[in-house]
């Protein structure tokens, strides 16, 4: 039976990683951003994910980011779901163990990218990780647009049934039919999170448990309140917030994330816009789109 985690519900923020002009991590700024999240109503913190540019950080940097997040979470009564996945099963296991030692409450493990494994390969990969870190909760991360492979509903359900510590999935496939199949047949206590801001309210109406969000970096109060209303069945209020912040949710992906989000954070005076190659700062056209969304929401 799937491990029961009462805390795994609601708004989780896929935290950005602020960099200084020289490319190093701005740890002091990062700590302030994490504190801002919790004070804004976010109780689930996700460091070292796609939005955190983990692909361009070395292991020591990722571990330090996780440690900072854990320290804030313990002090402010939040939980940490740390990104630990890669396309190398042995490396994923090793780093997941290190994240557990650093105090993370759960591991977010992305589908192996580039390798393009079969569904049997997916099952074997995640099974090996789950068996190697028994007792450590694991959230699957399905994002075909970035990995070039999809974790099918059948494979997700098979993994959920086979391993009690595979407790959730972050579904960013955009495939409602697939997600509904998971929701319909999931075992008791298995959680389903939207991986796309704009699809969250409809997915919660179908039974999803929360969101791993980009836009909550920028507007934690509004995003967490939207999720809270939806989970409580107050869809009238959830829809009002959804449509209010929809322009920002969509604008955050006019170019490769997290460049748009970092531009907004810079405009709000929260951090510098610096991004690590191969990503680059927002184009002039992208800036105009984001400034329009900022003005519409009256964020400045």
Image: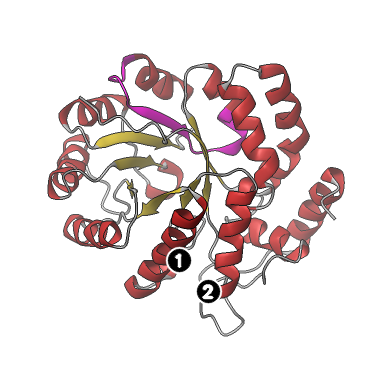
Q: Which residue is mark 2?
A: 27
**Residue 113, position as x, y percentages in the image:** 32, 52
Kindly identify which numbered label has been placed on residue 68: 1
User: What residue appears at the point 64 percent right and 46 percent down from the top-left corner?
Assistant: 215
**Closest to the observer, 109 or 172:** 109
- Spatial CA distance of label 1 from label 2 is 8 Å
User: What residue appears at the point 26 percent right and 25 percent down from the top-left corner?
Assistant: 157
Task: Check disc 1 and report its element: helix, strand or loop.
Answer: helix
Q: Badge 1 local density, few (<14 within 10 Å), some, or many (20+)?
A: some
Q: Does 286 appear above or below 233?
A: below
- Count of numbered labels shown in the rendering: 2
**Residue 267, position as x, y percentages in the image:** 77, 63
Q: Quadrant of the N terminus?
A: top left
Q: Quadrant of the C terminus?
A: bottom right
Please give the range of residues in magenta: 185-200
Are dots 1 and 2 in contact, CB under 8 Å? yes
């Amino acid at each position: 039976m799937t491990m029961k985690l009462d805390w795994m519900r609601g708004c989780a923020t896929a935290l950005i990683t602020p960099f200084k002009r020289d490319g190093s991590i701005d740890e002091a700024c990062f700590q302030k951003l994490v504190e801002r999240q919790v004070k804004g109503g976010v109780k689930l913190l996700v460091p070292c994910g796609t939005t955190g540019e983990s692909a361009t950080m070395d292991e020591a940097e990722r571990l330090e980011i996780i440690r900072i997040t854990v320290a804030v979470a313990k002090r402010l009564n939040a939980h940490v779901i740390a990104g630990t996945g890669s396309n190398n099963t042995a490396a994923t296991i090793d780093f997941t163990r290190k994240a557990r030692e650093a105090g993370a409450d759960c591991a977010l493990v992305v589908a192996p990218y580039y390798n393009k494994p079969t569904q049997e390969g997916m099952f074997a990969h995640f099974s090996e990780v789950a068996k190697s870190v028994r007792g450590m909760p694991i959230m699957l991360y399905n994002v075909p647009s970035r990995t070039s492979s999809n974790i099918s509903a059948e494979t997700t359900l098979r993994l959920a049934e086979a391993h009690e510590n595979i407790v959730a999935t972050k579904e960013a496939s955009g495939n409602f039919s697939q997600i509904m199949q998971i929701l319909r047949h999931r075992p008791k206590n298995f959680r389903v999170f939207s991986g796309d801001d704009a699809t969250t309210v409809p997915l919660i109406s179908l039974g999803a448990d929360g969101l791993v969000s980009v836009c909550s970096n920028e507007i934690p109060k509004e995003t967490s309140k939207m999720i809270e209303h939806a989970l409580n069945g107050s869809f009238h209020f959830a829809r009002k917030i959804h449509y209010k912040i929809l322009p920002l949710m969509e604008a955050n992906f006019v170019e490769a994330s997290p460049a748009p989000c970092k531009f907004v954070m810079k405009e709000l005076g929260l951090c510098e816009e610096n991004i690590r190659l191969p990503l680059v700062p927002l184009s002039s056209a992208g800036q105009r789109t984001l400034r329009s969304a900022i003005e519409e929401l009256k964020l400045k």
